Amino acid sequence: MPVVKTQLRALIAAHIEGALDALRAAGTLPADLPSPDFVIERPKERAHGDFSSNAAMLLAKPARSNPRALAQQLADALPASTAIEKVEIAGPGFINFHLTPAAWQQQVRDVLDAGDGYGHNASAGGQTVGVEYVSANPTGPLHVGHGRAAVIGDCIARVMAANGWNVKREFYYNDAGVQIENLAKSTQARAKGLRPGDADWPAEAYNGDYIGDVAAAYLRGESVEVDGHTIIGKGDADDIDAIRAFSVAWLRREQNEDLAAYGVSFDRYFLESSLYTDGKVEETVRELIANGHTYEEGGALWLRTTDFGDDKDRVMRKSDGNYTYFVPDVAYHLSKWQRGYTRAVTELGADHHGSLARVKAGLQALDCGIPAGYPDYVLHQMVTVMRGGEEVKLSKRAGSYLTLRDLIDEVGCDATRWFLIARKPDSQLTFDIDLARSQSNDNPVYYVQYAHARICSLLRQANEKGMPHDAANGEANLQLLDDAPAQELMRELSRFADVVEAAGITLEPHLIAQYLRELANAFHGWYHASPVLVSDAALRDARLALARATRQVLANGLDLLGVSTPESM
């Protein structure tokens, strides 16, 4: 993936390139020595500068120079700039840049000029990426784990779009297999008057109350519309095929409604069953056989996945003629490539880890141009929900697990999304209902949203007091924002584009949530230290400009998380 330089980093990179050109012209560096792929990053400690580069360290060997000496020569050759206050050489040859207040003040103008697009970049160049997430079996209501998958996938899609990808959101329905048969048998049993615990109740049946709701709707002859198709309950408790079709449609509709309430949508719903009816599974298997990557043993068909890094070969077709579960996954991901997804991201629960290597091996064995590593997998860990210091496990409707709708009803969509995205996907997550409902600074989503609402209130007060914000006057007087809290807030504003870039590269949208909390903290600190609605119009408008820029970045970041931006709280 190409390295993206955000505005300040691009400015420093241009200055380094200017210094390199000067050293080449002076003969200090060979005229034909190319510029290295140097990095410009923010040091962890502020004392080490605002930005740092390893350019001299990368050039030292081909230039046959000492890296610290070369770093000093580069520093001395830097073009004059109103954005760079001083340059220091550190360690083995790092070049540390300290920026001027004017450089930070320019960030306010940049934010206000870019508006909703601030922080976005075009690094992906409009390439198409398919992002698959949730992909729950249509056998019951969505649970909290599905909720974590949904918000991770949705936020990955939003962040990738902000990095210039043409994003296609996809939900893969496992509507074939044993679990669907268990669903049909469960609904049929309820339709015949049986209940969990009865002697004839199927051993593998789903026991939640929702099965009774599905059976009752089927017996009443209700109609269910999903994906443009209408399925009508026949009312015949002996017609297992009709019950199966109705049950899947009924639960798909319910899942779709839950996801809509959660602010999650998709561009395409892909049915696993279509891979069989359209012959895609058989076609994929034939191609693997033709490419010489399979063999027969013990009456089964095997794929030589060890040729592609797997720890052992895998059975594709069992001796009974049925395919193992990774085979349709290979066919499905092949379809993504064939549909123009130059990159694919698949979000799954960590319990799917075992199948990843064999799916990737199967795709490579097809030898059809799919790049190694396709698709990118993002795995999430389990969620523990707590209330009053005790774990909450059960739902009245689902019985064996807490549903996503239960959580949304209790704490709201915003808090649910925030708390489920706030940590790295592969880390365990504890969802504290009491904290999510609290209106305090300890509640991160409240704290961030309150910063946005506080700025909206500030602008309303300015109008009510006859001090409407003069935007032009504010931008003309940004040099008045020279106090430490204002400088700190502007530094935080400047980090947003870097965080969006990093979240897009690493597929870790929790970085946005972490950043927003830090930005809100900087804003609240500045707000308490710097009265805004002062009598001095120039200072007032400059501070209102900074407040407006902060509101814009808060709004842009919250949008990437699918969280609302209240104007009052």
Image (spheres, helix red, strand yellow):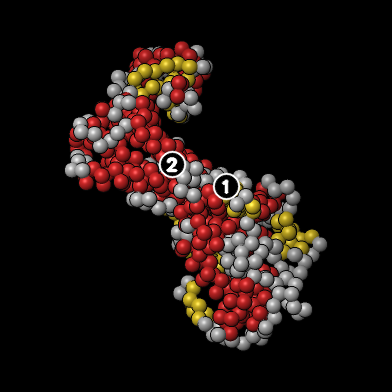
Point out residue 384 in the picture as x, y percentages from the top left corner.
62, 52
Point out residue 496 in the picture as x, y percentages from the top left corner.
40, 38
Q: Which residue is mark 2?
A: 516
Indicate the amino acid at tag 1: Pro
**Is residue 174 visible in this depiction of the protein?**
no
**Neighbours of disc 1 within 10 Å: few (<14), some (14-19), many (20+):** many
Residue nearest the observer in this picture, 287 or 392: 392
Residue at left 23%, top 31%? 539
Residue at left 51%, top 71%? 253
Query: Considering only vertical position in the picture, is 278 above or below 34?
Result: below
Indicate the amino acid at tag 2: Leu
Quadrant of res 9: top left
The image's mark for residue 475 is none
Residue at left 42%, top 37%? 521
Q: Secondary structure at mark 1?
A: loop
Residue at left 44%, top 44%? 447
Q: Earlier in the sequence, mark 2 or mark 1?
A: 1
Point out residue 419 in the picture as x, y percentages from the top left corner.
52, 49
Quadrant of res 272: bottom right
